[in-house]
Amino acid sequence: MFDEASADPATCVRIFRMLAAGSIPKNRRDPIFKFAGIDFSGDSFLYHEDVIWANSFKHSNKEICYYLALASLRSLGEFLATGKTTLDIIQAPVDPRDYMSDRSLIYVENDDIHFVYEETKNFTLH
């Protein structure tokens, strides 16, 4: 996703919203048209992409992009085998604590990166 978006946060979020909402382009001039035919599948996962998408208006494109970047480092195989939704901090290319804010979508506890929108099983969409 990041390669296709040329690391532009707004474009990354546009692609994410297209994928999460199952959107198809309206016509050739639609900004998502050039991404619609690309296979973005891989061996990482988002457990509650619908909740992230529904609450994305509360966060900046940069915050959503950072969340997606770290989530893309998680192993789908490990999740399917164990149900683990966290990421070991050692797997992150940079220390996420350097990028966290009061509104952060992630937090670190016991050397695990936790993803706020994937932690709770009973979400309420606002």
Image: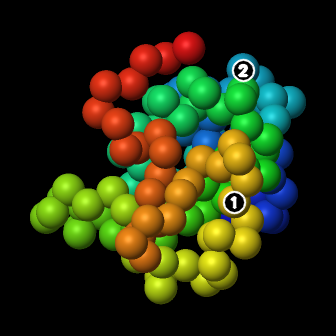
Is residue 25 positioned above or below 63 on the image? Answer: above
Q: Residues within 10 Å of mark 1 (few under 14, many from 20)?
A: some
In the picture, residue 54 is in which quadrant? Answer: top right
Q: Position of residue 114 (x, y in %)?
A: 44, 57
- Residue topped by disc 2: 26
Q: Position of residue 97 (x, y in %)?
A: 65, 70
Q: Position of residue 124 (x, y in %)?
A: 43, 18
Query: In the figure, is residue 44 to the left or right of 18?
Result: left
Q: Can you see residue 97?
A: yes
Is residue 27 positioned above or below 74 on the image? Answer: above
The kind of residue tagged 2 is Lys
Q: Which mark is residue 100?
A: 1
Q: In the depicted view, which residue is nearer to us: 15 or 113?
A: 113
Q: Residue at x 80, y 29 (%)?
A: 30
Observer-side mark, 2 or 1, equals 1
Q: Residue at x 47, y 85 (%)?
A: 90
Disc 2 or 1, which lies upstream in sequence? 2
Is residue 54 positioned above or below 76 on the image? Answer: above
Q: Residue at x 69, y 60 (%)?
A: 100
Q: Residue at x 62, y 43 (%)?
A: 16
Q: Position of residue 96 (x, y in %)?
A: 63, 70
Is residue 14 positioned above or below 71 on the image? Answer: above
Q: Residues within 10 Å of mark 2 (few under 14, many from 20)?
A: few
